[in-house]
Amino acid sequence: MTSIVDVKKETGAILDKLGVPRSAWTGGDMASFSPVTGEEIARLPAMSSGNCGAAIDSAETAFKAWRKVPAPRRGELVRLLGEELRAAKDDLGRLVSIEAGKIPSEGAGEVQEMIDICDFAVGLSRQLYGLTIATERPGHRMMETWHPLGVVGVITAFNFPVAVWSWNTALALVCGNSVVWKPSEKSSLTALACQAILERALKRFGDAPDNLMQVLIGDRDAGEAIVDNPKVALVSATGSTRMGREVGPRLAKRFARAILELGGNNGGIVCPSADVDMTLRAVAFGAMGTAGQRCTSMRRLFVHESLYDKLVPRLKAAYESVSIGNPLETSALVGPLIDKLAFDNMQKALEAAKAAGGSVTGGERIAEAGKDTAYYVRPAIVEMPDQTGPVLEETFAPILYVMKYSDFDAAIQAHNAVGAGLSSSIFTLDMQEAEQFLSDEGSDCGIANVNIGTSGAEIGGAFGGEKETGGGRESGSDAWKAYMRRATNTVNYSKQLPLAQGVSFDI
Ligand code: UN1
């Protein structure tokens, strides 16, 4: 593979076109790389902790003004953001491909996910409903109201560099909050692009307060500046379980709210009645798509012994033939790993799998001519005798561990016997098996699917998972409630003062 596209030049052209000031991506200390070629594409000035603190102060001022704007009017800003995203879809999608290495349809798909959440949030801006509740006292009325929360801190990972910001920001904005965003150091350019796109929406909106949404460019220090600042009411953090173990207790210490969206070790169970052709496609996308770098990527597969020899050889053939290559200039289905560390971690996991009795197909590096700084790999499928060693951990790379099962209950038990609890799938045409998998005694994950893979969730559902995945929910359903504070209001419109629970207190 030789590179025809000048990645650095194209990056600059897209950033210029989207209106990102050059001072934000040239001349700084923080180097930014494209995994497509491994080359440096920009140098960003990182913010000091002091500057981050000042930004959070100004975000608090913005919050105090924004919370007074009626929610449907706040929705208008998000509607305009959705329009600007539609206009910028091709450029932003391409920048996602450059910075995260996604194939074009996945880069564009990520921007589509942003547009979808904007539409969702616009509707929501007229539906921030509270309940009215029957009271036990005569002449009283009880209700709950939802109020804006404050400054929302958003910390995102490289693999969904823009969509995860939009899930949080679209909801935070209609809920009346301001936002400070710390993107991954590996994907800060797309963050700058999002900021420029939002600036355009803000300009059209007219009278929004300044500093309603700010990007904090930096490394770990910028993240810590958000996590430890008492002015940040909620932190929504996406990343590894290791990161969550540090962030969670620090937020708990100051009683801040947390939405943690951490690691996944997503599994699927293929039952005897499964539609093999469909399962094959679903597993291929779930496990090899995005080069295995989604938090929802499929990583473990339990195949019933009666189907094993029908499915697994076909899967292995798909792994051997899948197209791998530069997403900017080929139509390959699998792009690069994000960096050398990801590659090294993948190789370590494969070695450990072999040591535990696994038989590995694929996993080797694919050379990119003249570009020894890019890491393309053939996705690996590993037949394991049982669920041990690296199978129990998330490795953020395209490795699918395949195991044979004979007893359905034991398969569910094994499926649930890992630390993470994000996404899960069952492939079956047997209603009893499907319902059991979805029941209280079935999958213990935040997402449980039937006859589709583990990845590629729509924005309309609540997104997140249990156990070491952190328990947070973002995106659709009633996830908005985490971005607001609830007040229970009891109003006495009588001329008496009856006390609840029959208490008497006559003075
Ligand atoms: C992530 O990998 O952090 O369900 C998010 C999916 C996407 C989101 C993934 N809608 O795969």
Image (tube, rainbow, N blue to C red):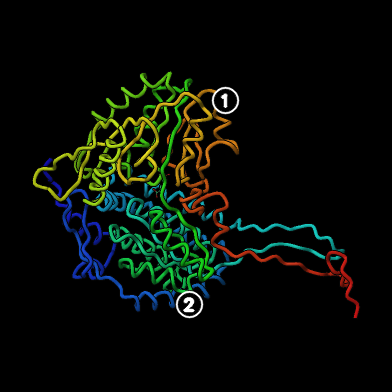
- Which quadrant of the rendered structure holds the C terminus? bottom right
Return the mark for residue 46.
none
Nearer mark to the viewer, of 1 and 2: 1
- Percent across and percent down for residue 168 are 46, 58
| Residue 175 located left or right of residue 197 | right
User: Which residue lies at the image location 50% right of the left edge and 25% below the top edge?
Assistant: 407
| Residue 21 located left or right of residue 206 | left
Return the mark for residue 431.
1
User: Which residue lies at the image location 39% right of the left edge and 32% below the top edge?
Assistant: 386
Label 2 secondary element: helix
Work out whether 116 lies above or below 496.
above
Sequence-wise first label, 1 or 2: 2
Whether residue 333 is visible here, answered yes or no, is no
The extreme bottom residue here reads: 507
Residue type at numbered disc 1 = Met
Q: CA distance from mark 1 to mark 2?
A: 54 Å
User: Which residue lies at the image location 32% right of the left edge and 30% below the top edge?
Assistant: 383
Q: Residues within 10 Å of mark 1 (few under 14, many from 20)?
A: few
The extreme right residue here reads: 506
Q: Which residue is mark 2?
A: 61
